[in-house]
Image (tube, rainbow, N blue to C red):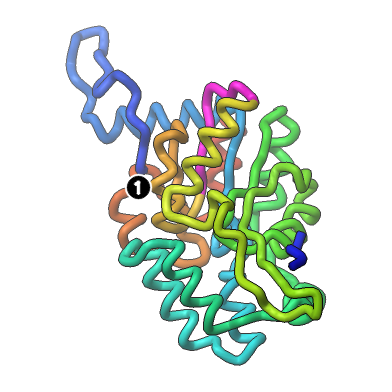
């Protein structure tokens, strides 16, 4: 076979003491701490589908292969956290069964659309010397295409790999990739911290699999600019709907 190539992690402080020893409400303190972490981050990890790009890559692939409606419903359940990610991914791909040719044609005919503001945000992070990673439950070939548009090294891409037989027919996916299962994004972040000795890592995304990556991420920022996941919006202590909000945070320092 060939392969294709806020919720907050709380600090030890639950509140901040003023000079008069009055407690600042916990939620406010947490948000202030999270913003400080973001402004001083060593690395920022972005989810891709419905975060860095406007669509869900697997849904677009499903539509391209003629099974869009059924797969879109599975995606909604997966992102809502009601089924395990690997179970949802397996079921969706079993319906789609994309060939190598279909995946490549999707990228060329219907390339992913970047979310407004993401190009500027990534550029600003790079200017500040912050490492940017794409950590996605989507597919490597599609995510690498996105990375190239944002000047993110393909070595900084962590995504799922589809498998194909030599005639190009679908042969499954690489189940050993950490991003193929629930909790996988957290495993990637733990790996990055160990490998690069990052002290402060931020995870940004729209879905339940992004939120659960904190910890080990030091801060989670929920993103609802393309689609709002109810569970994430309710639980994330820092929730934004446009990347300009993060650009402004960086400019304040």
Closer to the camera in the image, 185 or 227: 185
What residue occupies the far bottom of the structure in this picture?
A: 66
- What percent of the width, then of the height, locates residue 17? 25, 14
Residue 84: % across, % down: 38, 62
Q: Which residues are magenta?
A: 196-204
- Report x, y in % for residue 121: 66, 45
On the picture, is 248 further left or further right than 4? left
Q: Helix, strand or loop at disc 1? A: loop
User: Is residue 243 visible to us here?
Assistant: no
- Residue 100 shows up from this direction: yes
Q: Residue at x 60, y 86 (%)?
A: 63
Q: Residue at x 70, y 48 (%)?
A: 120
Residue 106 drawn above or below residue 176: below
Q: Is residue 20 left or right of residue 63?
A: left
240, above or below 7, in the image: below
The residue where tag 1 is placed is 236
x, y (%) of residue 222? 43, 50
Residue 9 lies in quadrant? top left
- Which quadrant holds the C terminus? top right
Q: Is residue 140 magenta?
A: no
Q: At x 29% / y 33%, what residue is drawn? A: 28
Q: Residues within 10 Å of mark 1 (few under 14, many from 20)?
A: some
The one of 240 and 8 positioned closer to us in this rendering? 8
Residue lying furthest top: 19
């Amino acid at each position: 076979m060939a392969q294709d190539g806020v919720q907050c992690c709380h600090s030890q402080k639950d509140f901040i003491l003023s000079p008069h020893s009055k407690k600042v409400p916990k939620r406010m303190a947490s948000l202030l701490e999270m913003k400080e972490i973001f402004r001083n981050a060593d690395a920022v990890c972005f989810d891709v589908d419905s975060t860095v790009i406007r669509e869900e890559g697997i849904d677009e692939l499903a539509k391209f292969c003629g099974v869009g409606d059924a797969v879109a419903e599975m995606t909604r359940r997966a992102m809502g956290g009601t089924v395990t990610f690997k179970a949802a991914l397996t079921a969706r791909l079993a319906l789609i069964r994309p060939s190598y040719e279909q995946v490549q044609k999707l990228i060329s005919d219907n390339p992913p659309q970047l979310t407004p503001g993401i190009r500027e945000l990534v550029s600003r992070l790079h200017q500040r010397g912050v490492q940017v990673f794409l950590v996605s439950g989507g597919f490597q070939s599609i995510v690498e295409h996105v990375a190239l548009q944002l000047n993110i090294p393909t070595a900084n891409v962590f995504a799922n790999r589809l498998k194909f037989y030599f005639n190009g027919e679908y042969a499954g996916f690489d189940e050993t990739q950490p991003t193929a299962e629930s909790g996988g994004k957290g495993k990637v972040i733990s790996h990055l911290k160990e490998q690069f000795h990052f002290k402060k890592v931020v995870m940004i995304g729209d879905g339940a699999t992004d939120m659960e990556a904190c910890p080990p991420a030091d801060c989670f920022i929920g993103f609802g600019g393309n689609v709002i996941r109810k569970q994430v919006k309710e639980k994330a202590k820092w929730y934004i709907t446009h990347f300009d909000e993060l650009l402004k945070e960086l400019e304040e320092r």
